[in-house]
Image (cartoon, helix red, strand yellow):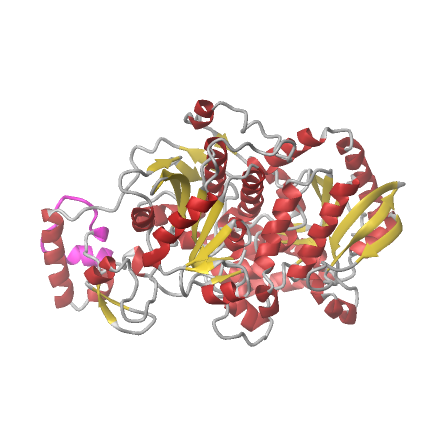
Amino acid sequence: MRSVVLLMPIKLPFRSRTRSYPPDLWTKCPGCQEMLYEKQLEKNLRVCPDCGHHFRLRVDARLAQLVDDGTFGERDAGLESVDQLGFVDQKPYPERLAAARAATGIRDAAIWGTGTMGQHRVAIVVMDFAFMGGSMGSVVGEKVTRAAEAALAERIPLIAVSSSGGARMQEGTLALMQLAKTCAALGRLSDAGIPYLSVMTDPTTGGVFASFAALGDVNLAEPGALIGFAGARVSAGTIAETLPDGFQRAEFLAAHGFVDLVVPRAELRDTMAGLLSYLAPRPMARSIEGNGSGDGLLTRPLAGALAPRPREVVHG
Amino acid sequence: MADATALVGASQAVDDDQVPDATETLDEQARAEVWSRVQQARSVKRPHTLEILAAMATDVVELHGDRLFGDDPAIVGGFCRIEGRAVVFVGHQKGAEVEQNVARNFGMPHAEGYRKAMRLFRLAERLGLPVVTFVDTPGAYPGAASEERGVAEAIARSIQVMSGLRTPIVSVITGEGGSGGALAICVGDVVLALENAIYSVITPEGCASILWRTPDKARQAAVAMRLTALEQQQLGVIDGVIAEPRQGADAEPEETAVRLREAIVAQLAQLSAWDVDELLAQRYQRYRRMGAFVETTPISTPRPERHGITDRLRDLLGSSRGVLIGESGPLRPKAADDVDEPPLREDL
């Protein structure tokens, strides 16, 4: 880009040039190779009108589609990862983070908050693959956990919309520990009878699939989404096994019993709202006594649990 | 010996490094030392779960099968007595010889292995017996059969079962603590590791092939991930490191087993005094506080820019210029959501 900047006829003293170009007007569908008009694609929820290929959604678009207009309130927006390991590969981790923040406009690969879907108030976590491959580091793990804890405190359903390549290697085992952290929090949620709806979108792999994404009371997936534990190349290359047709696709997962429903994007919101009408906890439902969740959260006053947390630095 | 080859291998790899990168300044001796630990952790001569138990426990009874699909030889489990105290043990099992190792699938479990583990965890809970787990796997098996039977779901479920299990759990990483396949049986009240054990989010080779785009940089990746037991203790991921005998666990398995027994018995004695609810609260907090982040005030969250008139003007000038000089490619940075290629293969 630098050389291009030097060639500019007029240098306007405004914002950085790097993001000032309009997105392409046409997008090629990877499913059917058809050229799609961007505006039409947007109108169709970024689903190819010809072959039904589901493009990945950015977090804003996903929230806009699922949560009722104007009801979403983001929580814990200020969480930022810390480079605890001093991790350097070809670039230092802080540089990668900064680049991802600049490119996506979000601070990490997940956003959580509360909002309503129809008549249901929900806690919802949405992941964004555009931020470092949607990888789960400390911030993503913390947000999922806080969302689960808030759902527990408020007794509202939890929804997680996953899109992730797995755990974030740059955070080493601290990223791995997020699997334990999120699964433990979901365990308490489940013990207390609060429903959890997992929506897997393309892709949901590695550590995210092997933790909170797999544990929904109901698991939904978008058509054609890649969902799997290990990369197909790992399986095919290292293990030298031939892979069945449609391996690790949403339909494959549904056929093998790990996904309840494969839902096209246009029907996703209504399907989820319909499920919530069965899943949503009865307002006065009480948790089972002595179920292992001796946590204090259930007995803590609602206002206390909802109050903004003080700033803190948490180190592993 | 594994040691010697590791050191030779390391120096060769350093010679091969033609491309300078940010890690080039790293002390090469440290790199070699870390890699020799990786080699030790992987050594087939290292005692594995059943060998360790034979040396440190009595009345070992192995139980088999997950009651759903089959019996996974890569995970063993059952009852044993450690200094007279009855416990339920679960551990990864590698083989010492090639044939055994193939039979054990190199310690890489399928879904049924974790489901067997869960079955035994629940049995321990019902019987009021403490659980001791031995962790030594490169990772869960990444094959097609494993995916079909839902190894990821089994791992997630096993983590969840352990995190809420109403009985004390002591986990020991004895060799390779490889990713989710290790963590699935490594959620304990106390997590210990042998001195030459490693614990990582992905194998060094896997990390290198994703972040450096070549598995040859595994040594750099091993250093960068801080996967040695001592570093993991500093990070707070594990609670204690058990020193190995001077020649290493592979050379002195008997002495290693003695040290393991002492450490495990000491932890079990402490944990058994706890009230179960308190124990669970502590276990929850142990994992709850893991992670490194700061909470900033979210006032200036950068949002994607809107296209004002000046932007449009600039776009117009910029893109026409770009077409003129034939650089339309670099002039159009791809919007993040245009990228619709296969994902980074960050398996766990």
Kindly tell me whether residue B31 is visible in this rendering. Answer: no
Residue in the foreground of this view, choosing between B186 and A259: A259
Q: Position of residue A217 (x, y in %)?
A: 52, 49
Is A236 on the left or on the right of B276, as rendered?
left
Q: Position of residue B248 (x, y in %)?
A: 78, 52
Q: Residue at x 64, y 56 (%)?
A: B35
Q: Position of residue B148 (x, y in %)?
A: 58, 66
Judged from this view, the residue extending furthest toward the bottom is A242
For the image, the number of numbered tags is: 0
Q: Residue at x 41, y 37 (%)?
A: A79
Is B22 on the left or on the right of A176, as rendered?
left
Residue in the foreground of this view, choosing between B245 and A51: A51
Is A152 on the left or on the right of B59, as rendered?
left
Quadrant for the C terminus of chain B in the image: bottom right
User: In which quadrant of the rendered view does residue B239 lie?
Assistant: top right
The magenta stretch spans residue A2: yes
Q: Which residues are magenta?
A: A1-19
The magenta stretch spans residue B231: no
Q: Position of residue A240 (x, y in %)?
A: 59, 75
Looking at the picture, does residue A43 appear above or below residue B169? below
Is A46 on the left or on the right of B165, as rendered?
left
Looking at the picture, does residue B41 appear above or below residue B16? above
Kindly tell me whether residue A232 is visible in this rendering. Answer: yes
User: In which quadrant of the rendered view does residue A69 lie?
Assistant: top left
Quadrant for the N terminus of chain B in the image: bottom right
